[in-house]
Amino acid sequence: MVQAVPGYDGSKKNGDKSMSKIKEIKGGVTAPQGFKAADTAAGIKYQGRTDMAMVTCDVPCECAGTFTSNVVKAACVQWDMELARSGRKMQAVVINSGIANACTGQEGWDACKATAGAVEKALGIPADTVAVASTGVIGMQLPVEKLENGVAAMAKTLERSEEASTAASKAIMTTDTINKEIAVTFEIGGKTVTLGGMSKGSGMIHPNMCTMLGFLTTDLDIEKKLLQEALSDVIKDTFNMITVDGDTSTNDTLLIMANGLAENTRITEKGGDYETFKNALFYVCRYLARRMAGDGEGATKLFEAKVVNAKSKDDARTLSRAIVGSNLSKAAIYGCDANFGRFLCAMGYSGAQFDQNDVELFFESAEGRLQVFKKGVPLDFDEELAVKIMKAPEVTVFVDMHEGSGEAAAWGCDLTYDYVKINADYRS
């Protein structure tokens, strides 16, 4: 893991003491009370592996969501946006991998409707409380009969178990090499609340909403408006701070369901309980975001940029995103080349205004910390130590702007030959 660095803590804005009260537990989306999951091999596109997942709740849930800012939105995104903003409850979500259901016209919308209808037929859950999500190739029509058969099969195998959660997180993978899931507990009003999540994302990842598929579940009792506010705020410093290749997907969807089964006093206004929940939400989303960034297509390491003491929070975000988003920076990380000019150059065209004579830049990892630039002047440094630091599986470029108090971190990955190989034959 990247070592702790004095002057920056990614959880600082959310309260260090509250963060210390969050406990990681085994599991994912089935960890909170009332949630079940299942998976199946429906043959949507992939053969010989699971490619559909379903998450359901025993009771209707308050729901919230954030979605792609890409003007070209998949049919499933449009379906889920309507549900999340309608005021209706949500009780299930069905996800398929392999085909994105994007750029598919009315037929794509009808596939969403048929999938939700299959859930209603199999489980009695109203179709208008069922979300749907897809990931994969753009421009292909979904095989509706396979979707319906997949839902029917999963309805018989739904479980509230760690195994079911993990299997679901694997079924939604496309070019991902690892599944991504997490669960935590925290206390609100003397009640133990659980929050679980899973996500997928490896390519077409760029900060312009949340750039992936993500599904969060909690047994917290909270008002819908506040649930949405918390989610929309938290993604600014988590999923909106990752990039793999500069491409914002047509299918980006992050959904959260809250069922109230923890029996805490319902959160109806901002205050201590709301902040406690938001801290836990930040913790989970940051974990998933970092896992996604480190699993970028063809990646060999997680590439992190931390910017401290910028003029503003927005400037810190802009600068850190520019560093991890630069192809030249990503190539330098892959080649273990401590060419600090790549990173300073990216900062310079980011749009943030600063004095280069105030800047200090460091490379760091579990192997050590090395300063290479100070107050506008390059420093002599040990090249062998630099290579050792940059060979670690997680590498950080740490930048002190010395101009204010704004802090932010962004995450990406190195750029390798395999990225081109993967995307050159993705459709075939």
Image (cartoon, rainbow, N blue to C red):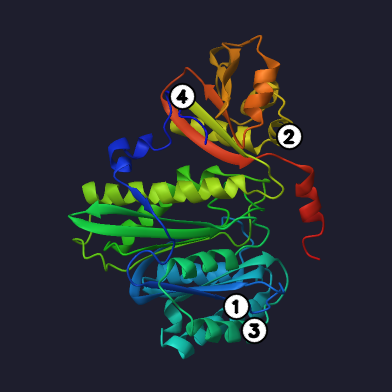
Task: Say which mark, if any, is on residue 237.
Answer: none
- Per the model, the C-alpha gap separating discs 3 and 2 is 41 Å
For marks 3 and 4, give the CA distance.
54 Å
Q: Which residue is mark 3?
A: 146
Q: For label 1, count other residues whose C-alpha is less than 10 Å away and answer few (under 14), some (14-19) or many (20+).
A: some
Q: Residue 80: horizontal and vertical position, in percent? A: 50, 69
Q: Nearer the viewer, residue 91 or 419?
A: 419
Say what amino acid the circle numbered 1 marks: Trp
Q: Element at badge 2?
A: helix
- Closest to the camera, between mark 3 and mark 4, is 3
Q: Which numbered mark, 1 or 3, is in the foreground of this view?
A: 3
Q: Which residue is mark 4?
A: 311
Disc nearer the start of the sequence (2/1): 1
Question: Residue 366 placed where, x, y %?
Answer: 55, 30
Q: Nearer the viewer, residue 92 or 365?
A: 365
- Which residue is the site of mark 2? 331
Of mark 3 and mark 4, the one earlier in the sequence is 3
Would residue 52 appear left or right of 18 to someone viewing this image? right
Q: Earlier in the sequence, mark 1 or mark 4?
A: 1
Where is mark 1, residue-wise? 109
Kind of residue at disc 3: Lys
Position of residue 95 relative to residue 382, above or below, is below
Which sits in the foreground, 351 or 112? 112
Is residue 156 in sight in this rendering? yes
Determine the CA span between mark 2 and mark 1: 40 Å
Give the residue displayed 31% in from the left and 57% down from the top.
226
- Disc 2 crowd rating (10 Å Cα; few below 14, some 14-19, many 20+) is some
In primary-sequence order, the first of circles 1 and 3 is: 1
SS category of the residue bearing label 3: helix
User: Is residue 238 shown left or right of residue 70?
Assistant: left
Q: Whole-Å distance between the Cαs marked 2 and 4?
A: 28 Å
Circle 1/circle 3 CB separation < 8 Å: no
